[in-house]
Image: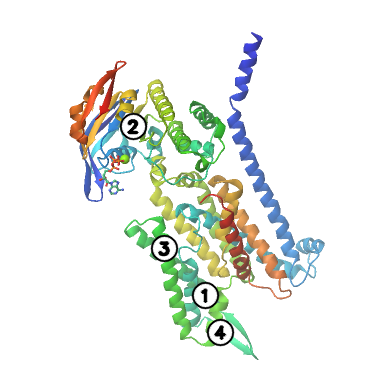
């Protein structure tokens, strides 16, 4: 199954932010979405999640036209983590993750829903504070819970907007490892907005480089070159190979 | 081998223990609901016995099954009054609960949309402009008799107007919940200015009648009023309860709610319309009863957490309990005079609200 984004144009009110975006995302792969501030990364994720309606273009998952789905059906296929949510409700971690099961709950959660929540809590290793209020946790702990909620949604597509910002290095690696393994093992289509290019090179399989709402480059890690980085960020960078992986050194 | 088995059993035990803890917590919340219901039953029975004439408990029960000297009071005065307290308290509590959710504002209350001022203006129009209130003066005591239903209908129309204007403005330009709260304040001020304008040109007894009308008073309720109140309230709370998961999602930011499949626009619109509807109904029949809708959801949230599966029914139950208890106080405080319950709820509600604000740990 592939997620096909076909000639999407989108924006807010009258301004156009995304211009004619077309990409295909494959199952089991993590795609990193990279670009400067204001280049339209979050907007692209919101279009796929159904939060921003595109002016033109079509989004298909396999042969399903995603735009024709009802809210709940769409939520069973696509999970979305927004960029830095500033307002958190005072619900417990368990309740927050249980909300990820909402698209499946018609009356009350059944034992499967509860089991999924428990499994997810264990995957993220957050048992110790499963019944603490989410607004009483640290930034890194909160971020784990929010990603856990998206994963508990058990969708085909996972959209994460800057999931590891403000996290310490250990938590960055832990979260990205979970995302990568879960994507590969469950055959997910995962798109992650990352600002740290080396982190992207470490965990992503595919790369999309965005600037001013246009796709500048896309493909495997080879597309990340000093030349391209100069083009989209206007910076000087060097590229080295360390343990068979590409690394970028910003000068 | 033995050791391995033990390990297996241990992991078996650990598996499911988070779910168990959760189910245990849910059971505690259910117990809290049962406790609330028991409290309501007790206060309800007590409120039937209390008043300017104390009726012994045994006589209350016997008066229900067979005619005795208390039957008239119990059936026509005490019972309708206490039933009105339960329905109106529940309606105000649940309306506040939903308003606080959809406006994302813990200080939102059923009156945030200007319902009370709109209702008071409607009543003033009926009494002053259409002369729905007449008055007999006996010495220096003035007794006011209303053309009750004209005033009720006018009050309801006034309340509905306030809400519809605000909702129209908000959906004209899709304004934020915060702006809706502010628009409610502005709307309230327009309506109270209009009411004062009418009062300025009215006769003394008409002014007295409009002021008297605004006092929230459960004594205004008879069986007909109760049936109408219940007829409005029951379908609305069923709808609210059916949306509990959507309200849970709406606790998060709007984008999260949408990505979980919530149609936030229609959820907000119907939520505001329906809560305004039941509050307008209560206000039209009983007058303005403040603070129940603000405080009941707050206290319930402090006690059982932020889960609308429980918050919706329990805000209703707690609202009912608060209004019943306030009415008991209203009957006793200046015995044998019965103080309008709206005065009691505001008098007790405001300090309680201050306390809740100070006691709240999180900023
Ligand atoms: N709700 C909105 N209303 C109007 N314009 C918006 C809105 N959200 C974003 N924009 C505009 O759209 C453009 C792209 O924003 P977007 O959030 O997609 O950028 P981004 O690539 O995610 O940036 P960042 O790295 O800073 O998160 C910006 O110019 C921004 O000003
Ligand atoms: Mg962004």
Residue with the most extreme front position = A251
In the figure, is residue A169 to the left or right of B85?
left
Is mark 3 in CB contact (under 8 Å) with mark 1? Answer: no
Q: Which is closer to the viewer, label 1 or label 2?
A: 2
Q: Which is closer to the viewer, label 2 or label 4?
A: 2
A211 in relation to A2, above or below: below
Residue A221 at x, y = what percent? 26, 23
B89 in relation to B204, above or below: above
Q: How many neighbours does mark 4 have within 10 angstroms: few (below 14), some (14-19), or many (20 or more)?
A: some
Question: On the image, which quarter does residue B225 sit in?
Answer: bottom right
Q: Chain of mark 4?
A: B
Is mark 3 in CB contact (under 8 Å) with mark 4? Answer: no
Which residue is under mark 3? B182
Q: How many neighbours does mark 1 have within 10 angstroms: few (below 14), some (14-19), or many (20 or more)?
A: many
Q: Earlier in the sequence, mark 3 or mark 1?
A: 1
Residue in view at x 55 percent, y 45 percent? B309
Question: On the image, which quarter does residue A235 sit in?
Answer: top left
Residue B134 image label: 4
Is mark 1 in CB contact (under 8 Å) with mark 2? Answer: no
Q: Are marks 2 and 4 on the same chain?
A: no
């Amino acid at each position: 199954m592939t997620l096909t984004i076909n000639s999407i144009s989108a924006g807010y009110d009258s301004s156009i932010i995304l211009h004619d975006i077309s990409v295909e995302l494959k199952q089991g792969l993590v795609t990193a979405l990279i670009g400067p501030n204001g280049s339209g990364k979050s907007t692209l994720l919101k279009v796929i999640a159904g939060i921003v309606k595109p002016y033109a273009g079509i989004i298909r998952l396999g042969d399903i036209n995603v735009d024709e789905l009802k809210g709940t059906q769409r939520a069973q296929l696509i999970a979305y983590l927004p960029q830095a949510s500033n307002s958190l409700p005072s619900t417990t971690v368990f309740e927050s993750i249980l909300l990820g099961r909402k698209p499946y709950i018609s009356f009350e959660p059944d034992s499967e829903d509860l089991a999924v929540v428990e499994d997810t809590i264990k995957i993220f290793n957050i048992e110790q504070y499963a019944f603490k209020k989410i607004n009483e946790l640290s930034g890194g702990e909160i971020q784990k819970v929010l990603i856990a909620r998206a994963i508990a949604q058990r969708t085909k597509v996972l959209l994460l907007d800057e999931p590891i910002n403000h996290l310490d290095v250990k938590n960055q690696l832990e979260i990205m490892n979970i995302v990568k393994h879960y994507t590969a093992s469950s055959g997910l289509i995962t798109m992650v907005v990352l600002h740290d290019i080396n982190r992207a090179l470490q965990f992503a399989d595919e790369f999309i480089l965005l600037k001013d709402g246009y796709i500048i480059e896309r493909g495997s890690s080879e597309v990340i070159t000093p030349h391209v980085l100069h083009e989209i960020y206007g910076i000087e960078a060097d590229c080295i190979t360390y343990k068979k992986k590409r690394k970028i050194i910003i000068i | 081998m033995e050791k391995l088995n033990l390990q297996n059993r241990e992991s078996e035990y650990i598996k499911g223990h988070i779910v168990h803890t959760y189910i245990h917590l849910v059971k505690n919340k259910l117990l809290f609901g049962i406790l609330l219901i028991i409290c309501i039953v007790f206060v309800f029975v007590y409120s039937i016995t209390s008043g300017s004439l104390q009726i012994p408990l045994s006589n209350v029960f016997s008066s229900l099954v067979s005619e005795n000297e208390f039957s008239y009071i119990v059936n026509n005065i005490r019972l309708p009054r206490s039933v009105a307290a339960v329905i109106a308290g529940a309606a105000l509590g649940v309306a506040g609960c939903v308003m606080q959710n959809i406006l994302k504002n813990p200080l939102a209350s059923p009156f945030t949309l200007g319902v009370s001022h709109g209702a008071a203006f409607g009543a003033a129009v009926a009494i002053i402009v259409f002369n729905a209130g007449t008055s007999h003066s006996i010495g220096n005591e003035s007794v006011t008799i209303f053309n009750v239903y004209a005033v009720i209908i006018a009050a309801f129309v006034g309340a509905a107007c306030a809400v519809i204007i605000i909702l129209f403005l908000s959906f004209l330009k899709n304004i934020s919940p915060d702006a809706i709260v502010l628009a409610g304040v502005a709307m309230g001020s327009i309506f109270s200015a209009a009411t004062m304008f009418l009062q300025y040109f009215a006769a003394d007894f008409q002014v007295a009648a409009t002021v008297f009308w605004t006092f929230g008073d459960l004594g205004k309720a008879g069986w007909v009023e109760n049936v109408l109140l219940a007829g409005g309230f029951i379908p609305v709370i069923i709808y609210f309860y059916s949306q509990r998961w959507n309200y849970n999602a709406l606790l998060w930011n709007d984008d999260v709610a949408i990505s979980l499949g919530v149609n936030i626009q229609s959820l907000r619109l119907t939520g505001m319309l329906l809560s305004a509807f039941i509050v307008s109904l209560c206000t039209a029949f009983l007058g303005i009863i403040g603070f129940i809708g603000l405080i009941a959801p707050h206290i319930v949230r402090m006690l059982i957490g932020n889960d609308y599966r429980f918050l919706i029914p329990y805000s209703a139950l707690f609202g009912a309990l608060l209004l019943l208890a306030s009415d008991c106080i209203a009957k006793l405080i200046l015995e044998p005079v019965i103080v309008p319950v709206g005065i009691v709820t505001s008098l007790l509600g405001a300090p309680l609200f201050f306390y809740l604000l100070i006691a709240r740990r999180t900023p």
